[in-house]
Image (tube, rainbow, N blue to C red):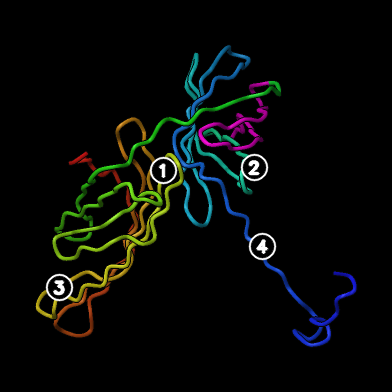
Amino acid sequence: MPDYSYNENMFFNGVSKVFMWVVPAPVAGVWRGETKTEKGEQELKLTLFQGLSGTTGSFELCGVETISGYVKTDLWGNHLRFECIAGDSTSCLIFDGLANGDSLQGTVAGSMVQQQAWELRRDNADFLGTWEWDWATRSRTAKIDIKQGDGGLLCSYSDGVESKPVVDFYNFGGGFYFTALLANGGGGQKPADTGWLIGEAVLDGSALKGTIAYHLTAEMNQQPPVQYPDSREDWVPKRIAP
């Protein structure tokens, strides 16, 4: 308020700061839309992964020929802007619009299309069930179990050594992101991986696809503990139970 000077006189050496964080819309998933190009009608398949620090993705533009590449995104609340970059670094399409549930509506332009109104629809996604995969760093099978709770989806993790709820689980519509702190010491009797497990995925048809990162230390009986190098790999867990 222009006539309120208490903070200016009393705190922060006369300077007050206000920080604002705009909650991003949940846009992860597989999106599809048709557009008129110089080569006729073509369908775009857009795959977006969403985490806490940003949104990344890839695209396929299918028609007379298929063009694919990566996607540069800028998400501010429900305002999404993305640019499709082909393998030869050519910008094919630029979209600017708003996300509303499973719909993206706005305008598209680019080297292959004239500016036009455009809508993309997101594929339905059902994550419910138990998903299993093999660890890359150890001979161990891990699972996450996703269930419907009163306030949204709930996730738990198990690997034969440790079983725990995944508190940091984020449902971004057609995909999800999670972090799990693994801290089972195994009673000091046998090795047990400790550290962070970070995964992100989208549902493409019936397949869950994404990446998983391991930031782990193996706690051994002897000292010092063995340190595993951080790793990140493609993640394609299998649904073993509905």
Tell me residue 236's x, y (percent): 28, 43
Between label 1 and label 3, give the one nearer the viewer.
1
Which of these two is toward me, 90 or 150?
150
Along the polypeptide, which appears first: circle 2 or circle 1? 2
Horizontal side, residue 37 vs residue 46: left or right: right
Q: CA distance from mark 3 to mark 4?
A: 44 Å
The 10 Å Cα crowd at callout 1, few under 14, some 14 to 19, many 20 or more, is many
Say if mark 2 contacts mark 4, CB within 8 Å.
no
Please identify the quadrant where the C terminus is shown.
top left
State yes or no: residue 166 in magenta: no
Which image quadrant is residue 227 in?
bottom left
Horizontal side, residue 159 vs residue 91: left or right: left
User: Going by the picture, which residue comes out furthest to the top?
Assistant: 40
32 vs 79: above or below: above
105 vs 82: above or below: above
The magenta stretch spans which residues? 89-113
Q: Which residue is mark 2?
A: 79
Along the polypeptide, which appears first: circle 2 or circle 4? 4
Question: Quick one: SS at disc 3?
Answer: loop
Under mark 1, the amino acid is: Gly
Q: Which residue is mark 3?
A: 191
Q: Which residue is mark 1?
A: 175
